[in-house]
């Protein structure tokens, strides 16, 4: 079913399986995989900078719009704890007149960026649910290891 969408927006806490699932969609269904995390690598080393988070999300939205206008299907894998973090991607899909859906990843696989447990707990506290208007196009998917 997910392969019928042009834009899949993944959200979940660090270590929930977002990147793994996005890579699977890219490999098995030809989606272009985009993540804000890709914009935090400096000389091959991941260095998250919260002051640059909004810019990273804007770059993903720009790339998403460009890809969709070019006929590509995309999967965006970000934490998307707050709704503003995915609003621009939703806007890009709407502008490109593409079908989009949300997938909430809820696995607990450990996170590759070493985000401390207290930071993840704070993110969980800030989690914003999807608005009622998106309920029809929203669904959840648990990612299994392997």
Image (cartoon, grey):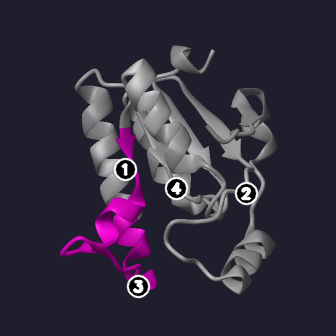
Mark 4–mark 1 distance (CA, rounded to whole Å): 11 Å
Mark 2–mark 4 distance (CA, rounded to whole Å): 15 Å
Q: What SS does tag 2 mark? A: loop
Mark 2–mark 1 distance (CA, rounded to whole Å): 27 Å
Residue 22 in the image: x percent, y percent? 49, 39
What's the mark number on residue 108? 2
- Labels 2 and 1: the sequence-earlier one: 1
- Labels 4 and 1: the sequence-earlier one: 1
Q: What SS does tag 1 mark? A: helix
The answer to whether residue 65 is visible is: yes
Around disc 2, counting alpha carbons within 10 Å, would you say few (fewer than 14), some (14 to 19), or many (20 or more)? some
> Which quadrant would the N terminus be assigned to in this image?
top right
- Labels 3 and 4: the sequence-earlier one: 3
- Left or right: 9 as drawn, with respect to 95: right
What's the mark number on residue 61? 1
Circles 3 and 2 in contact, beta carbons < 8 Å:
no
Mark 3–mark 1 distance (CA, rounded to whole Å): 17 Å
């Amino acid at each position: 079913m997910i392969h019928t969408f042009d834009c899949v927006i993944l959200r979940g806490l660090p270590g929930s399986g977002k990147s793994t699932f996005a890579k699977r969609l890219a490999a098995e269904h030809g989606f272009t995989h985009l993540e804000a995390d890709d914009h935090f690598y400096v000389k091959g080393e991941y260095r998250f900078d919260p002051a640059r988070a909004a810019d990273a999300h804007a770059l993903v939205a720009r790339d998403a719009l460009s890809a969709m206008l070019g006929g590509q299907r995309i999967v965006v894998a970000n934490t998307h704890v707050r709704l503003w973090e995915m609003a621009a991607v939703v806007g890009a899909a709407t502008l490109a007149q593409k079908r989009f859906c949300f997938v909430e990843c809820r696995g607990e696989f450990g996170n590759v960026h070493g985000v401390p447990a207290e930071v993840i707990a704070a993110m969980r506290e800030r989690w914003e649910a999807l608005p009622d208007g998106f309920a029809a196009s929203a669904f959840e998917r648990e990612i299994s290891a392997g």
